[in-house]
Image (cartoon, helix red, strand yellow):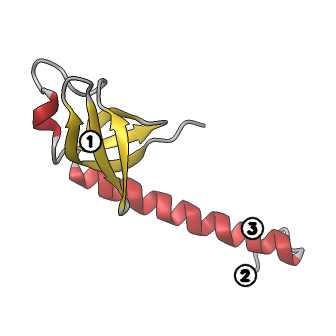
Amino acid sequence: MCLGIPGQITRIISARERRAEVAINGVRREVNIACIADAEHPAESCVGDWVLVHVGFAMSRISAEEAALTLDVLTQLGEAQLEMDRMRESGRTEPVA
């Protein structure tokens, strides 16, 4: 499964090399923005954009609302996975009502 994580571009590291810094849930990392920067939306204008990040690349621009919804779903999935892991560790394989 491929998963894009929402992040917000906070600064351009190199417009020529199309590298930017993205904040992902409070963590800042460098990503390649070649997939989202073009003549109509140059690298310099990407600061503030919400993007889906996958393996170090900003794959597409998304709205702030879509980013918030996606982060909420990912949080819920993480909590569900944590609960499933706890159930496996305790020897239970079925949810308890």
Which numbered disc flags the more N-terminal residue, 1 or 3?
A: 1
Residue drawn 85% across and 78% down? 90
Q: Which residue is labeled 3 in the image?
A: 85
Residue at the farthest right position: 91
How far is disc 3 from disc 2 in space, using C-alphas? 17 Å
Q: For residue 81, which numbered disc appears in the image?
A: none
Residue drawn 45% across and 41% down? 4
Q: Quadrant of residue 20?
A: top left
For the residues bearing labels 3 and 2, Cβ distance under 8 angstroms: no
Query: Badge 2, how many Cα within 10 Å: few under 14, some, many 20+?
Result: few
Tell me the SS state at disc 2: loop
How far is disc 1 from disc 2 in space, using C-alphas? 38 Å
Q: Which residue is labeled 2 in the image?
A: 97
Looking at the rendered image, the disc whose residue lies closer to the viewer, 1 or 2, is: 1
Looking at the rendered image, the disc whose residue lies closer to the viewer, 3 or 2, is: 3
Say which quadrant the N terminus sits in.
top right
